[in-house]
Image (spheres, rainbow, N blue to C red):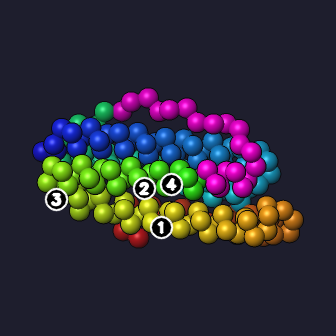
Amino acid sequence: MLNEKLQQAINKQINAELHSSYLYYSMCAYLQNNGLSGFAHWTKIQAQEELTHANKFFDYVNERGGRVTLTAIEAVPTEFDGVLAVFKQIKQHEELVSELINNLMDVALSVNDHATKSFLQWFIDEQVEEEANVQAILDNLKLINGEGHGMLLLDRELMTRVFVDATQTGA
Ligand code: FEO
């Protein structure tokens, strides 16, 4: 059985993951509308990944005999100030998510729940990867100053991203 405080914290995280997905879909809509199909594609896959994160928490609460409660998802911006601003915001957003996961781990440790600690380790590792992935794109964007032929190449490269449900494969 899940500790009540921990259950509440995980439910909040389910909301945060769904909110992340909503944010990435909004970015995708903006990028698509600005003719950046590859960047848009990358954010759409990111949105799909966030749904798998929410799902992993959802299943875990049920597996532990807890109760999932879904609450309102905070509105997301619909306008952005160019592709560089979008990716800076993604970096900030993923840093915030890493902090949320760390806080969740603190709650699990405070109630001595070793099963949840083990479960959360996947997310700790995943966040390292997420931050690194977006930082690499940001670095490229800065290098080409968001302009010219480099943008076309980067847009094409991001189009090749393939959706993988890492929560199922353990990848
Ligand atoms: Fe679910 Fe991007 O972290």
Q: Please, what secondary structure does the residue beneath circle 4 have? A: helix
Measured Cα–Cα span from mark 1 to mark 3: 24 Å
The vertical placement of 114 against 61, above or below, is: below
Q: Quadrant of residue 133?
A: bottom right
Q: Residues within 10 Å of mark 2 (few under 14, many from 20)?
A: many
Observer-nearest of 82 and 166: 82
Q: Are circles 3 and 2 on residues that touch, CB within 8 Å? A: no
Tell me which amino acid carries mark 1. Answer: Glu
- Residue on which the image places disc 3: 114
Q: Please, what secondary structure does the residue beneath circle 3 have? A: helix
- Residue on which the image places disc 1: 129
- Residue on which the image places disc 2: 98
Q: Main secondary structure of the magenta part?
A: loop
> Does the beta carbon of the residue at mark 2 sit less than 8 Å from ligand 1?
no
Is any part of residue 18 visible from this angle?
A: yes
Measured Cα–Cα span from mark 1 to mark 2: 11 Å
Observer-nearest of 140 and 78: 140
Q: Which residues are magenta?
A: 70-89
Q: Earlier in the sequence, mark 1 or mark 4?
A: 4
Direction from residue 169 to residue 82 in the image, left or right: right
x and y percentages locating residue 13 in the rendered image: 37, 44
